[in-house]
Amino acid sequence: MKKAFGILVALLAVHSAIAQTTKPVVVSTWKFGLQANEAAWEVLSTGGRALDAVETGVRVTEADSNNGSVGIGGTPDEHGNVTLDACIMDETGDCGSVAFLQNILHPISVARKVMEETRHVMLVGKGAEEFAYEMGFEKIDLLTPKAEARWKKWRAENEEGKKQEINAENHDTIGMIALDKDGNLSGACTTSGAGFKLHGRVGDSPIIGAGMFVDNEVGGAVATGWGEAVIRISGSHLVVELMRQGHSPEEACRLAVERLISKNPDWKDIQVGFLALNKKGEYGAYCIQPGFQYATYDPKNGNQLSDGKSKLSKKTK
Ligand code: SD4
């Protein structure tokens, strides 16, 4: 009798855990995440895999030449080259990444090819570009006239090599995490990186654990903002580990921002935001400066934009 009661309690606990899970869900950074979410939702709502959803979603942003921080039209480096960083991770912990990649429209899809077609996780620079051509990707010019004009203006006003700061105009990486109908999580992150960076600079976005991380038992997280500060604390991995300890997604993001602040004396001069989604379909975000927005799509609320809570109440940059 006692045993039967125990089994009943266990079954009820499992049932309520399943009932509490919201699926599918997709979350992504910044306002343009709304469009990316729409594309991801088409995959998720028809029973597709989270991995396909995140790749499909961020490709929308990569192809948008009006977006000055991702893919074509991205802000170039100090020499006028558009160099791209991206990474992707699936529910098994498999992952792929490209960094300092030029002339390719969809770095996220090259990152997926690295994951699926090679024994490696990360390819950079010329090697990554040659690999992309071998995989059938086309060579294109990523520098749009608008981005070139921005670079010429910057060059006229600044010395090359000057430290670039991530400010309100310079921080629009797309990071996306999705939970599919089977309860599996995947993530993607893609960017042209910090505007007017040193040639060869790689940020946090293609670094698994810094710009993005997924653990299918717990949740996933992405980062946006000044990548150097994110790398120093392995930001996205830290957010996931904090969720593993029982923190809500928003609280995990807040604690990661606090850690980052403790390691970066210049924290008031930079923006960094984290966005997280857990296994139950709950999400949250936190950032240093106000102004970080994120887009979420779930069955109950549809596609919506929210303001991330911030450490500072007024922008200092
Ligand atoms: C980087 N984290 O290259 C990227 C830039 C970014 O939103 O997130 N912009 O440092």
Image (spheres, grey):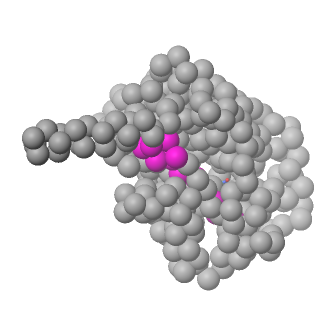
Q: For ligand 1, give the image quadrant.
A: bottom right
Determine if the magenta segment contains residue 143. no
- State the image coordinates of residue 144 (x, y, percent, origin top left): 80, 36
Left or right of residue 213, residue 162 in this image:
right
- The C terminus lies in quadrant: bottom right
- State the image coordinates of residue 118 (x, y, percent, origin top left): 33, 33
Q: Is residue 99 above or below residue 182?
A: below
Q: Is residue 223 above or below residue 11?
A: below
- The N terminus lies in quadrant: top left
Quarter where residue 257 is shown: bottom right
- State the image coordinates of residue 123 (x, y, percent, origin top left): 44, 43
Q: Residue at 89% of width from left, 65% of height from top?
A: 157
Left or right of residue 131, residue 45 in this image:
right
Q: Residue at 45% of width from left, 27% of height from top?
A: 181
Q: Nearer the viewer, residue 16 or 239?
A: 16
Magenta segment: 271-282
- State the image coordinates of residue 218 (x, y, percent, origin top left): 38, 49
Q: Can residue 229 be seen?
A: no
Q: Nearer the viewer, residue 41 or 21?
A: 21
Q: Can residue 251 be seen?
A: yes
